[in-house]
Amino acid sequence: MKIFNNISDCVLVVFIISLGVLCNGEEEISVAPMEKTEKEALYYTIQGFVGNWWNGSDLYPDPCGWTPIQGVSCDLYNGFWYVTALNIGPIQDNSLYCAPNPEFKPDLLRLKHLKSLSIFDCFVSPHNHPILIPTDNWELLATNLVSLEFDPTLVSSVKFPLLLLQSLVLLENGLTGELPTNIGNLIKLRRLVLAGSDFRGQIPENFGALFDLLILDLSRNSLSGTLPLNLGTLTSLLKLDLSNNQLEGQIGSEIGNLKNLTLLDLSKNKFSGGLTNSLQELSSLQELDLSNNPIGGDLLSVEWH
Ligand SMILES: *[C@@H]1O[C@H](CO)[C@@H](O)[C@H](O)[C@H]1NC(C)=O
Ligand SMILES: *[C@@H]1O[C@H](CO)[C@@H](O)[C@H](O)[C@H]1NC(C)=O
């Protein structure tokens, strides 16, 4: 009995000691330092968006430690904190909101460990607040940035040297001109949403190289011409939304290759030339909208299963 007691005492002591080690370990992590340049870049970036009243060094002296900023996430690299995610706009409670006259500070591009950048409800109308994104030096973020989401109306365009991007969402940005063909080089993209702008011209052929793409949404633009023939190579696609454009010609049989497609929306375009039989090969399809097209032909030619 005595022996057992001793053993359990001993276990308890060991347990307490290891608890102490754990606590110390945590303490060390929570006081991990942050480079001055990184901290300043974060402060200036946020101040640009939310306004000069926001004084980060006053309000959040330890932004990755004991004074976290809503919408900012950090990670440790070689014992230092770096900002990995920045969200501005009404996403969470207590989110940071953009000022009426926000400014896109180039300091943003100094946050070299940034993986995800989302800015929503910021640049409401291109006519009220014309705003320029710095178009140079985005390659500084290229090694880490995987998600870039803007929901503002930005009167500018980003160049795209961001080869690791998996998600590019530029919703309702008042962007115009042709779709940049260099988006076709972003071969890691899984989500490409360029909806609700004023993009014109054809869908670039080289979008067919985006083999990992799961969601392609180019709806609500002014795209014209026929569907790229190599659209059928995007076999990973789950959602394809090209609705509300000026696309024309026949919906080709290559569409039948998209076996994983659950949503196909080609409504409000100028497609014609009847329905292709290959629509019936879309075995995963749950939603199909071809309304408001002068398609012609008849529905009987397709065997609906
Ligand atoms: C923030 O406040 C500190 C001290 O209160 C001041 O020294 C600093 O200049 C302010 N920074 C900005 C960017 O306003
Ligand atoms: C289609 O979906 C299945 C099941 O989710 C998956 O295993 C397969 O890899 C997908 N095909 C492509 C080309 O992504």
Image (cartoon, rainbow, N blue to C red):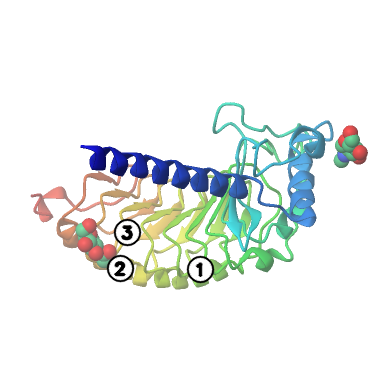
Nearer-N-terminus badge (2/1): 1
Q: CA distance from mark 3 to mark 1?
A: 16 Å
In the displayed structure, 281 sits above or below 31; it is below
Disc 3 CB within 8 Å of nearest ligand 2 atom: no
* Residue 238, visible in the rendered structure: yes
Q: List the single residue furthest toward the top.
A: 93
Q: Position of residue 58 (x, y in %)?
A: 81, 34
Query: Which SS class for mark 2?
Result: helix
User: Observer-nearest residue: 289 or 22?
Assistant: 22
Q: CA distance from mark 3 to mark 2?
A: 10 Å
- Residue 237's tag is 3
Which residue position is annotated with label 2? Answer: 232
Q: Position of residue 109 (x, y in %)?
A: 72, 58
In the displayed structure, 242 sits above or below 5; it is below
Q: What is the three-letter code of the residue carrying label 3?
A: Leu
User: Observer-nearest residue: 14 or 150?
Assistant: 14
- Residue 186's tag is 1
Question: In the displayed structure, does residue 225 sit left or right of residue 70?
Answer: left
The residue mark sitting in front, 3 or 2, is: 3
Q: Position of residue 157 (x, y in %)?
A: 67, 57
Q: Quadrant of ligand 2?
A: bottom left
- Marks 3 & 2, CB-CB < 8 Å contact: no
Nearer-N-terminus badge (3/2): 2
Q: What is the three-letter code of the residue carrying label 2?
A: Gly
Q: Quadrant for the N terminus, please.
A: top left
User: Observer-nearest residue: 158 or 274?
Assistant: 158
Question: In the displayed structure, does residue 67 sit left or right of residue 273?
Answer: right
